[in-house]
Amino acid sequence: MAEDIATLISQLNIDPQVFMVFLIVALMIVGAVVVVVASRPILDVYPYLNPIAKVRARKGRLLDDKQMSEILESNNIEEFSSYLRGLPDYAPYLAEYPIEKSLDVHMADTYKFISTIVPNEVKDSFDVLATKVDIANIKALLTAKEVGYSNEETSNLLLPSGSLYNDLDRLVDANSVNDVIAGLDGTEYGDILADAIPKYEEEGSLLPFSNALDKYYLHKLLHSTKVPGNDNTKAIYSYIGTQVDMDNLKLIIRAKADGLDYDALSPYLISEGYQLREWKLKDLMESDSVEGVISSLDGTKYAEILQEPLSRYNNGESISVFENALDSYFADYSHSLSLEKPLGVGPIIGFLSGKEREIKNLKIIARAKREEGFPEAKIQEMLV
């Protein structure tokens, strides 16, 4: 073979030394390509190794079925609170805040924690999720001013977390709803709240502000995901998109239960979704009733999920049966995503979803335990 190569070089009139240089360069290029291709899976995984270790440590402290059963069996709110004080994750919050507020602050801190540790390729979505506390605080402040709470009562409603907390805390002594909105001028929420003032003054209700904030949040959340470029961004795209679909469905179902028509609902709903595309959302909004919404979901994965809740709703149960069913589905769906990418974004999604489910269930139990004799079986039905 060496003789054949020498003959070829001679025929091409190429200097042997030049040929060797080209050969070495070609082999280096091929080797580099092989190294890049072989190392790509490692490069994809590496940014997630530290975040995975951190969330797995916290996931190990999520309440298991035995602990949740023990909490469910508590006789009253005092026993409920005492149990949580024995848990390291909840004790510091309960030492400082009332039960419901302590749970909300703990969840807000969890969103903040996740947004600070995730890799850059998925960070935008978790940053938007962390803004939930800002929106909750704005809604609380507007409510307090509408009903005339004192400054102390208003301050107690705010969660000490989020990027806007200091700004909102300074607005506690504002005299009115309009003064609060004027104080938020210059923030990302200033314009959308200002645009809702005419509707607020016309209806005499805070609903236009609440709906405008929800619409802004969902639009920003949906657009926080990029076109999937790898398995991690694909999982986030699916996770965030499904969450947007869920929130859209909840809003539409609540609106139909309140008898709102398309014209009243459409200004507050984003006209895009994940699996529920623009034409489907329009179809759902044009439905005449809750039953019509569920019927219009035929052909989607949500139709089967909401059939059993529809029967319960028709038998006199509240609209919350739909929200609980959607929350349960989303928690299970998020868990399945966490298993698909165990060395990437999966454990992060799994932990966050598990913590959200835990906090929701603890708040449900806490509210029930404030009512003497509330049936344990009924509480169980309400859990996500």
Image: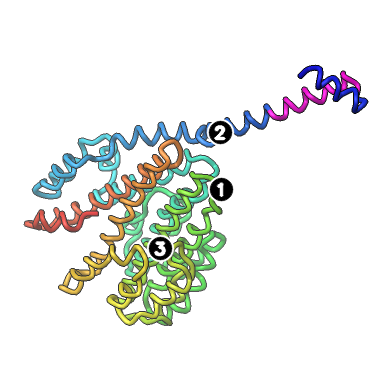
Residue, x 48% and y 71% (percent of image)? 278
Residue 72, compared with residue 372, is above or below; it is above
Q: Residue 261 appears at what percent x and percent y?
A: 37, 82
Precedes in sequence: disc 3 or disc 2: 2
- Residue 147 magenta-highlighted: no
Image: magenta residue range: 15-30
Precedes in sequence: disc 1 or disc 2: 2
In this view, the residue in front, 263 or 31, is 31
- Residue 23 magenta-highlighted: yes
Label 1 sits on residue: 229
Image quadrant assignment for residue 57: top left
Callout 2 secondary element: helix
In this view, the residue in front, 303 or 18, is 18
Residue, x 21% and y 38% (percent of image)? 85
Residue, x 15% and y 73% (percent of image)? 315
Q: Tell me: 185 left or right of 358.
A: right
Image quadrant assignment for residue 96: top left
Query: Type of residue at label 2?
Result: Leu
Label 3 sits on residue: 245
In this view, the residue in front, 349 or 375, is 349
Q: Does the image show residue 11? A: yes
The figure's colour scheme reads rainbow
Query: Type of residue at label 1?
Result: Gly
Identify the main secondary structure in magenta.
helix
Q: Does the image show residue 169? A: no
Q: Nearer the viewer, mark 1 or mark 3?
A: 1
Callout 3 secondary element: helix
